[in-house]
Structure formats: structure tokens, C-alpha cells
Image: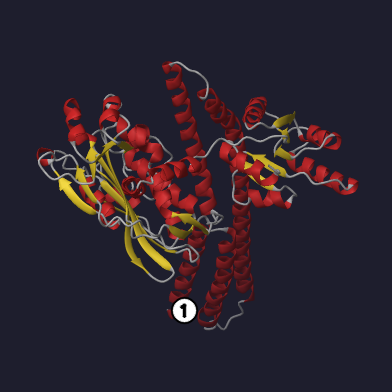
Amino acid sequence: MSKYIIKGLISSLAAFSIGLLGFVFLKLTLFQTSVVSLFFIIYLYLLFYIYEKYAVSENTQPVSEDSDDKYQLLENKFKALSSKAEKLEKENKTTELFLASMSHEIRTPLNGIVGLTELLDGTELTEEQKEFVSMIRESSHNLNVIVNDILDVSKINAGKMELESIAFDLFTKVEASVGMFVTKIEEKGIVLNLFTDPKIPHQVIGDPTRLSQVIINLVSNAVKFTDKGGKIDLFAEYIKEKADTVTFKISVSDSGIGLTKEQQARIFEAYSQAEASTTRKAGGTGLGLTISRKIIKSMGGKLQVKSKEGEGSTFFFTLTLPKVKESKKEVLPDLNHLKVGVLCSDTNPKSQWNGILQKYIQYYGAEYQNYKNKNIFSSTCPDVMLIEYSAIDIDRIDSFEYLSCKRVLMISSIHQSGLEKARQVFDEIIYMPVSFEKVGKILQLQKAEELGVVSKLEEKRAEEKVEKKSFENIHVLVAEDNPINQKLIKRVLENFGLTVTMASNGKEAFAYRQKEDFDIIFMDIQMPVMGGVEATQHILAYEKEEGVKHIPIIALTANALSGDKEKYISEGMDDYATKPLNIQVIEKLVSKYCEV
């Protein structure tokens, strides 16, 4: 009886294992599949060995035919698994090629839409036309986000997402993440509280682009699912610090629709949203949180959520990043003798500006005092008074002119109606949300006025203003087959003062290179007649044979898959830029490769 039990058990284990392996193959990369297959083969041989030793040895009759059948069955199973692995590998390659093609086909016309929209916005337009341009820009941005989300999740699943490790300003990244949503936030009347703990070192080492991507995604979701009059908090809080690392927590909270426990359990799954209806209500691919969680995981943290249905949600993560060793310790100005008053709305229970401003002001060493509307005129006046717009009666704004101190108004950009009147009463106007840096500038300016050196500060500010770059005597060759994109990049480059020659394909570009000298070449990748890579190889061969100076070649491509930049540089190109074109990137490339 034991023989049959063992035979049945082993057969069941083998069948279950083969089925499980087939399912697991669907979830693994090619390398992981190979490793698992190796261990599985060893596992099956062990099962077969046990089967032969304990189940078959009790039978004294010859079993050679039976054994041959079993070996044949096992061989067939291995062939089936090998065929499955080859099929999956082929499917993965097909998927990657499809994504590259899809990226190119979508980004090529999108490049024209985005670029021409920016150029159109720089012309004189009626208010209605400006509104239309704004709608085009928003729709283009949404389409670009969808394409990037799909490409990102494919990179992550294929294990091809790479993180940068460079120095960056953490404060700038956190505070800039809300910039693109300010208009939408103000349209919905949402109270935005932004706090970056001053104790966090400004300079850290990591991937600023990916960190911004996560924060932007979390803020975007909060804006989508928070109703009018709601509240959003973006906080970066100091946790602890060691000699070469700092640990901080970033959280985005909202007073929106909230999540049930069931929704929280699957909110990070790909293509998942809280409800099917939210896809129609708020849009999006449902990939943002999946990508964000995997990015934070690759940085050593974990993206989590706390929520209650109908009471909002908080998405948060904690990271430990290296500090920049060479960075100088921030030296704060001596503001110990400066008294700063704050008047925020008493009627708005959601306002946290008192607490946030108090931390900022006291970190600078200044004395903080909270005021209420009724006692602002009866109390001793501080050196600087920060006043929230919603805390005052705009019809009685003239009364603040009698305050014998520096008056600073904190206002949202939607309150344009009373702005002109406010400019006549207040010394400074700063737009909300108020950051640590904005508070610092106001306090330092006040200190400078006391010392009589405000003119020097103003001169420094003027020097720091970035003017539009203008190049002279630089000749650019551009190879681009799309007529709309030809007009776009020609206009963009000519706006920088560059002389531009256009080629419609790689063959034309190579012919131009043989006839003329250029300072830089922008080469599209996918073109008829001759593509960008082939044209580059012809140009490099020509330069080598003729012994002429090499002209830098920049790949222009709508493909944005991982490894594209390295691939094109290995083909002899000098650098890489993606479509839709980024004007700042083009400017940097010209500055980098041309003598200006």
C-alpha cells in the first residue's frame, strides 16, 4: 500500500509543481525564469529518484518499458517548459518593441502640439484664444503623462529602471512639486499647507527627478479627489540625522473622498483606482501609485497610505539619503533681535499657517508673536507683520497703513481684485503657499534695511535674474522628417539667434555635412530614406577619412525607453534629447557643445 501512496503523492507533487511553475513564469524576468528552471529540473530529478527507489524497487518484475515511458513523459514536460520560456521571451521582446514604436508614434505629433502651443502662447491673443491655448497645453500634458506612465511601468516590470545618484536641493524639489497645481488648487478653493522642516539639510544625494515624480503624483491625486473648499498638506519632516545621512518623512494629506480598507489593500496595484467610476471622474491610467511605490522601494523606503472613507487620505514614505559631504554648512543671518508678528485667519480651523510660520521664524532666530485681528492695532508693533489675506476685511485695508512696521501681505493669486489696492498699503506681497525661503528673504530684507544695505541686496537680486540666452554666429543642422516638427524646432532655434539648415532625412543631412561646416547637428532617429543612426555613421566615417573636425551630433527621438541614450551614444552620437522638445534642454545642449 505504501508504494501506491508514495506514487500518488509524488505524481501529485510533480503535477502541482509544473502548474505552479507555469504561473510563476508569467511574473518573472528572463533571468529569473532561467534560475527557477534550473532549480526546478533538479527538483524533478529528485522526485523521480525517490519514485524509482521507493515505489518501483518493491516490484521485482522488469520495469524498463515503464521507466522509458516515465522518462519520455519527463522529457516532454521539460520541452514544454522550455518552449513556454522561449515564447515568453519572444513576447517580452515584442512588447518592448511595441512600446518603443508606440512611444515614437505618439510623441512625434505630441512634440508638434506642445512646441507650437508654447510659441502660440507667446503671441498676442484674445482672452478666449488664451483660454483655448491653455486647454491645448493641459490636454497635451495629460497625454504625455499617460505615455510616460505606461513606459515607466514597463521599465520597472522589466527591471530596467535605473536611479541617479547626484547632489540636489531637497527643499527646492519639495516646494517646486506643488507649483504646477497652484492654479487648480486655487480654482477649487483648496487650502494648501506646505511645510519643509528647516532642520533637514538642503543638499542630499539621490535621484531628484524620480523623487519629484512621486511627490507630483501624490499631490496630483490629492487635488483630483479633494472637493472645493477642502485641504491638502504637503509636509517634509525631519526624523533623524547621522554623520553622513539624513532621514526624513514626506507626506501628502487631503480631506478628499478617502478609502475603505478594501480599497487601501489594492490601491497600489497596476491599473487600479479606488472605484471604477473614478477613472471617468478623475482620469489617469491607474499606474501612478504603482510606479511611485516601486520608485520609493528602490530608494530604500516604502510608500504607505492611511485613510478613512469620507475623511481623506494620507500617503507617506520615509527615506534615508546621504548628505553632500563637500557642501558648506548653511550660515543663517543674525536675526535674534528681530520681532515678527503673524496675523492668520481665526475663522478658518483648517489653517495651519500659524504653526508653520512660527517654526520658520524661530528657526531664523527671530522672535515670533501671534496676533488676532482685534488686537493688532492696540498692541506694540513688531518689526515685521505677516498678514494673511483671508484674515482681513479688504474694504478696511487702508487701516493697515497706520501700522508703524514693515507690512507683508500673504495672498493667493486668485485674489487679483484687491491686489492693486493692497500694493499701495503693504510694503511686500508674497504669494501662497509661503515657503521657508520666502520667509527668509523677507526677514533678511528687513534686516538689510535696518543696516542701510538694501541697495546691495537689490543689486544681487538683479544679478541673479536669468535672462533669455542668445547665441551668435552658430550654424545648426537639423535632420527631421516631420514637417510640423521642422517648423517648430527651426523657430525654437532661431529664437536663440541660431542659423538653421533643415534636412528632411539622414541622406540629406549627410550631403549637407559633406558640403558645409556646422557647429552642431540635431539628428532625428527614425526618418525615411536614411535613418539617424545610419546617417551618423556615414558622417563619422567621412570625418575620419577626410581628417576634418568632428561636429557634435545630438540624437532627437520620441523613444524614451531605458537604455536608449546609451544605445545612441554607442552608435557615435554625442548626446540625446527626447520629444516633446524641452527648450531648456536644447539651450543647455547648444551651450555645452558650441563655443559661446
Along the viewing direction, whichever of 117 and 79 lies nearer the viewer: 117
Along the viewing direction, whichever of 486 and 367 lies nearer the viewer: 367
Q: How is the image coloured?
A: secondary structure
Residue 97 appears anywhere in the view: yes
Percent across and percent down for residue 309 are: 22, 45
Image height check: is 7 above or below 182? below
Percent across and percent down for residue 116 are: 56, 26
Residue 275 appears anywhere in the view: no
- Which residue, given by chain and number where applicable, does mark 1 sit on? 3
The quarter of the image holding the C terminus is: top right
Residue type for callout 1: Lys
Residue 102 image-quadrant placement? top right
Image height check: is 468 above or below 41? above
Image height check: is 308 above or below 126? below
> Is residue 137 found left or right of 438 in the rendered image?
right
> Is residue 267 found left or right of 532 in the rendered image?
left
Residue drawn 54% across and 77% down? 46
Residue 202 image-quadrant placement? bottom left
Residue drawn 13% across and 42% down? 372
Image height check: is 150 above or below 399? below
Percent across and percent down for residue 44 are: 55, 72
Judged from the image, the secondary structure of the residue bearing numbered disc 1 is helix
The quarter of the image holding the N terminus is: bottom left
Percent across and percent down for residue 313 are: 27, 47
